[in-house]
Amino acid sequence: METLNGAQIACRLLERQGVTLLFGIPGGAILPFYDALSQSKLRHVLARHEQGAGFMAQGLARATGRAGVAVATSGPGIANLLTAIADAKADSVPLVCFSGQVPQALLGTDAFQEIAALDLARPITKAAWMARKPEDLLRLIPDAFRLALSGRPGPVLIDFPKDVQLATFAVEAWPEPGRAEAPPAPDSRRVAQAAELLAAAGRPLLYLGGGVTQAGAGGLALRLAEHLDAPIAQTLMGLGAVPPSHPLALGLMGMHAQPSTNLALEEADLLLVLGARFDDRATGKLAEFCPSARVIHVDIDPRELGKLRRPEVSIHAGAAEAIEALLRACPPQARPAWRARVAELRGRHGWPDGHQAPAALFQACAAALPQAVVSSDVGQHQMWAAQHYPFDRERQWLTSGGLGTMGFGLPAALGAALADPSRPALCISGDGSLLMNVQELATLGECGAWVKVLLLDNRSLGLVHQQQDLFYGGRRYASVYDAGPDWPALARAFGVAAVDLEGQADPAAALAAALRSPGPGLIRVPISDQAKVWPMVAPGGSNRAMLMGTEAKA
Ligand SMILES: Cc1ncc(C[n+]2csc(CCOP(=O)(O)OP(=O)(O)O)c2C)c(N)n1
Ligand SMILES: [Mg+2]
């Protein structure tokens, strides 16, 4: 029997979970926990803003599949963490977060730095609980990890009042660590129905979402596609599931897809949707999405089945389990006519003009750092990366998809790099987004991780003025900066090496050398503020109506 206080119990439970690294910022209401951390085996990385800590935890989680852990004090601390929690919910990222809270005797009194953390967190977490007694932690912490990792992953918050951190309890037995539960197995009758539909289809297409990468089922999905002779389209979250060089891989679908990908979807007569949720950025106007297709929808979250489009067959299952069952149930098929048609579409409707520069830039990055994990921020640079970066493995691409949170990229890359220091991380950022968590350059400079920030600097909020140019009469308002920082000087001020590709005699060589040198670095890439992401489907418009750039010039 060991008598420990709540803070010590929490640290011990985290150690028992296998956590080695956590991210946060201390404050009065969480100080007993920090004191216990100082005596534990856990490594705490001191972020410079709680949102940064949350995204570092996410970077670790997205890159490894383990639950990330972030810690904040009460009041402003947890308030700053909320954006990263909401982002984790939107992209199904497992996080376990701890917020300090005022002592329970002061709850509801507007005490210093009191905030209703549970009420704020409830809609953006899988669960938000308060530890009321130190012994509660023996149940809550394993449960938090189990819940964060099971089914459709997501964030869990434990609100941790200061008196509970300090109160002692004699622990007689430690609970088993919380683990992911086995994903649900598919119903065999549904699988048989799906197999019938697949056998009868002439133009089937696989639509892969983040659920496939979460499940590590990309290799299985590719086998199924080959087995069925069916092409594959991917959502933003599904990138990396299959290598883009594979002949059946059509890459990104939706708002900024290669036109042939959306046209193939348009002609498909059967969609096999795996771990995806008919997000509007992928489907465009839902009523006009894949009008002639029947739908088989596989998801681990039963609430997604039929939420936006009624499937002919719905299968509540993990992606890997469902694909394995389908591989057993479906005879192999060859569909030469459909394959020829898709090849024809690809020949005729490739990328519009303007793709060459971003494609070359990202090919060069991938060639210099093939092993890198790649994060992005949110904007044009993100969409160019999604279109052209050759992601060829799961958990290589970390991006804020559902919430689209500027400021995600740098801390996420840092979290991934700290989780696996043998591997560099590349953060593809924009000059607007990078400023939103720029303080984490200090954390990066301090810890010296191999994180390279590739800053696509158009001195503006590119994806905003792209919409203003296209849909608001060209009235660029509040989207162009009159002044930008001296980026190399700013990076160096934080102890981060910097290279400016502007004015370099051999920018390609400078880029490769900068990327390859271990340690922190920022590489500024000047970009015209006239550049656009083509094609583009107007928000709310049909994927059939892709703008190609010629309209804007007219
Ligand atoms: C936190 C947050 N605020 C606002 C937005 C809306 N928004 C989307 S893209 C964008 C511009 C991003 O600019 P930058 O990071 O420079 O990328 P660029 O499009 O220029 O490549 C904005 C303001 C957002 N996604 N996130
Ligand atoms: Mg910009």
Image (spheres, helix red, strand yellow):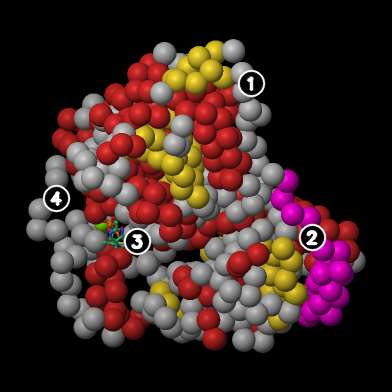
Q: Report which residue position mark 1 lands on.
A: 173
Direction from residue 481 to residue 13 in the image, left or right: right
Label 1 SS: loop
Q: Position of residue 241 (x, y in %)?
A: 62, 53
Q: Which mark is residue 484?
A: 4
Up-down relation of residue 106 to residue 184 (above or below)? above
Using the numbered discs, state the Cα–Cα distance from disc 4 to disc 2 in whole angstroms: 53 Å
Q: Amino acid at mark 3?
A: Gln
Q: Which mark is nearer the camera, 4 or 1?
A: 1
- Judged by depth in the image, the label closer to the viewer, 2 or 3, is 2
Q: Quarter holding the C terminus?
A: bottom left
Who's the residue at 65% across and 42% down the image?
180
Question: Mark 2 and mark 3: span between their CA atoms?
Answer: 39 Å
- The three-letter amino acid code for the residue at tag 4 is Gly
Q: CA distance from mark 4 to mark 1?
A: 57 Å
Q: Is residue 298 above or below residue 365?
A: below
Q: Is mark 1 within 8 Å of ligand 1?
A: no
Residue in the foreground of this view, choosing between 430 and 40: 40
Pick whichever of labels 1 and 3 is earlier in the sequence. Answer: 1
Q: Residues within 10 Å of mark 3 (few under 14, many from 20)?
A: many
Q: Which residues are magenta?
A: 182-207
Q: Quadrant of residue 349?
A: bottom right
Does any atom of ligand 1 lie closer than 8 Å to the CB of label 3? yes
The Cα–Cα distance between marks 3 and 4, rounded to whole angstroms, is: 18 Å
Q: Which residue is mark 2?
A: 186
